Structure formats: structure tokens, C-alpha cells
Amino acid sequence: MEKRPKDIISFPMHLSGELERLFDEMIHRPWGFSREIRGWDPSIDLYETDDAFILEADLPGVTAEDVKLELEDDHLTLTGSRSLEKKQSGGRFHSIERVSGEFVRHIHLPESVQKDAMEIDFSNGVLRITLPKLNRHTGESI
């Protein structure tokens, strides 16, 4: 009998967000749930500069009126909805991946920010929020 090494497969212990979404989708599909029923999760990036945190969210097909932001201390909540036109003229679908519905993203910021100085830009389907950091000593933006 051949002796096998103990560590046959090694992989990173943290799965990426995409992989987690894939597993989540695989778990729900056998029970008949679709993304449309569950809503969707827009992709976001959160990064920081010396004086601010910047959140960018991909929101194709969403208008500014369909998005709501709430900022409480170091918690940012992004909510909204997207509806897609579904046109079918006598054909049949082979794949449906574009989703619509409600979304909610809760983002924990590493530290508190100045709510009144928040800057928002929404263009070409990308929402960009600049959140100036608070100076820990004075409570004003950096």
C-alpha cells in the first residue's frame, strides 16, 4: 500500500466573495430559489487614503433616486433596487444571469467619519462615496 502525504491539498483558508456567492447560489438553487427572489448584492470596493475612506459600488441599471445611504457612527448602509426589462419575443432563454430586485449592503468602516462632509458621485453605473476621516483629537475632518 502506497503511503500518502498528509497534506494532499493545500488552499487558502479565506474564500473570495465571488466564491462565497457561488456556493450560496448552489445551495439555494436546488430548492427553487432564484437570485431574483433573494435580490442581488452589488459589488463594492472600500479603500482608504490618508484622509478619507472611499466606497465604490457597481450599480448598473440603478438610478440615483433608487439608492438610499444611511451613515451612523462607523456603519454605512446602502439600500436600493433595480428592475430590468425582460423582453422575450418568441425565443427561449438558455441562461439568465442579470438580476433585479432589492439590495442591502451593510459596511463597517474601520473608524468614524465626518457625516456632514461626505461627498457622493454617481455616474456610469458606479456610485462613489468619499467619507472624510475624523481627527481623533479634535473631532473635525483630517
Image: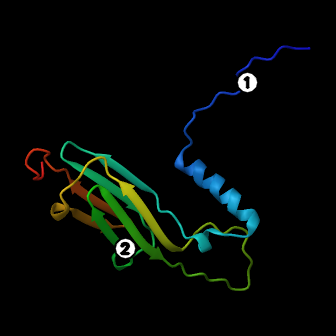
Q: On the picture, is 96 further left or further right than 12? A: right
Crowd rating for badge 1 (residues with CA inside 10 Å; few <14, some 14–19, many 20+): few
Q: Which residue is mark 2?
A: 67
Q: Are marks 1 and 2 in contact (CB under 8 Å)?
A: no
Q: Residue at x 55, y 70 (%)?
A: 39
Mark number for residue 62?
none
- Residue 56: image location, x then y, percent: 35, 57
- Residue 43: image location, x then y, percent: 46, 58
Residue 118 occupies which quadrant of the picture? Answer: bottom left
Q: On the picture, is 69 further left or further right than 140? A: right
Q: Residue at x 21, y 63 (%)?
A: 119
Q: Secondary structure at mark 1?
A: loop
Q: Which residue is mark 1?
A: 8
Q: Nearer the viewer, residue 43 or 15?
A: 15
Q: Residue at x 54, y 74 (%)?
A: 100
Q: How many marks?
A: 2
Q: Residue furthest left?
A: 138
Quarter of the image with the N terminus in it: top right
- Residue 139: image location, x then y, percent: 11, 52
Say if 106 sits above or below 60 in the image. Answer: above
- Residue 47: image location, x then y, percent: 32, 47
Type of amino acid under label 2: Val
Per the model, the C-alpha gap separating discs 1 and 2 is: 47 Å
Mark 1 or 2, nearer chain start: 1
